[in-house]
Amino acid sequence: MNRMSQQPVVLLTEVDPLIGVDLSDALEKAGYRVLGPVDTMAEALRHLEQDKPTLAIIDVLLKDGCCTALARELRQRGVPFLVHSDFRQDQRLNGEFQGVPWLSKPASPEDMVALCGELSLAVSAPAPEVPSSKPAAPIRLVHRTTGTSNPFARKLEGFVALTDADRALLEQISASPRIVQPHTDLVREGDKPDGVFLIMGGFACRHKLRASGAHQIMAYLLPGDLCDLDVALLDTMDHTLTTLSVCRVVHIAPETVAQLMEHPQIARALRMSTLVDEATLREWLVNVGRRSADERIAHLFCELLLRLQAVGLATENSYELPLTQVDLADTTGLTNVHVNRTLQSLRRQGLIELQGRRLTILNPPRLRALAEFKPNYLHLGERAAA
């Protein structure tokens, strides 16, 4: 089959039949044609002889053994694949699995579909190597393709008026994100910073880790967010940046950041973004210190709605929320049990609905009133007038 056909094809291998059915249903709903699910390497290889998939999802250990030969065959045929397995990523068996996106079971169908989308895009435009420490080449402008779909450009244009040249420059910077799996540290506390990270898809966070293993999340990094603009001034990181879901991430070298700051409107927008980050942290301190559990969660949900609307990733009252109750607990200073009770309380009050990983705010005015939510700290102007 032609890989550039309209409907992408996924070869799905999965030893657990229930997981296989769930993943197959999710992929078909997302517009994929699924080969499988199959639970043996022999059957998967037969599919490869008959059809050429766009990408593949493979389990490391199938009923007839380790799927090393299948991984090798996929590489030889130029078919990108990801691993969904009980094996940890640091238990890879050999080089056939090196550099492959890896999700530990049980990953959510939503994360799997999101990662498949990234791999599908990479078929025609493979992601480049992660930038090295070599000096960055001078930025070259490219023709603007779409001015509103890029979350980085959309966010900055919310603060200042950008020229076509500014937008083209931002699109050049963010053109080749790499796929990063959930719960991956982009940079750890104590590391020497080497440039900054730009989130183009998914949720990431800033957090601190205590010796006891307890986490405190201090910020969510959403699509369009640049992590720590001036971090290159530090000798070592004083916090950790970690993905919370499948993310698309761009590494930007310090030299490229310096070039961006030579463009007045972009520089102003980036400084405004930094001020908003600081204002948001102040609001989160109030949240943890002076609001009840219901108010904390309600305030956070109101904030995320506006931030995602600003980059075109939320409807009037609904958005994807790829966070666990543990993540919410680490954000709001509550226990997991207390978060669960709080979500149930908000549901009973008719304020929210959570289906899978999609949050719908059923009554935005009442939720804002409960949280005493004032969006002035986000500095969104007319975008926060609703």
Image (tube, rainbow, N blue to C red):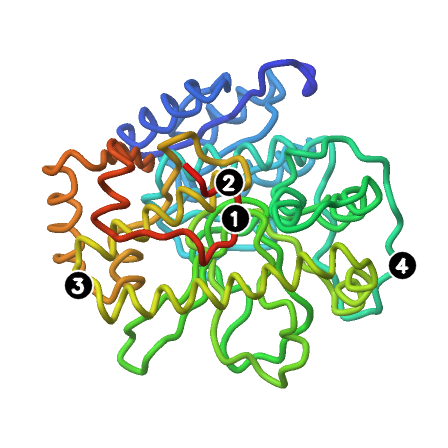
75 vs 287, left or right, is right
Please tell me which of labels 1 and 3 falls first in the chain.
3
Separation of disc 2 and disc 1 at Cα? 5 Å
Residue linked to disc 1: 380
The residue to which callout 4 is attached is 138
Judging by the rendered image, the residue that carries numbered circle 3 is: 335
Q: From the viewer's perspective, is residue 153 above or below residue 361?
A: below
First in sequence: mark 3 or mark 4? 4
Check whether the beta carbons of the residues at disc 2 and disc 3 lie within 8 A of each other: no
Helix, strand or loop under label 1: loop
Q: x and y percent of residue 107 in the render?
A: 36, 43
User: Which residue, given by chain and number where applicable, does mark 2 sit on?
Assistant: 383
- Camera-nearest residue between 52 and 335: 335
Query: Of marks 1 and 4, which one's residue comes earlier in the chain?
Result: 4
Tag shown at residue 28: none
- Whole-percent x, y for residue 306 in the image: 44, 43
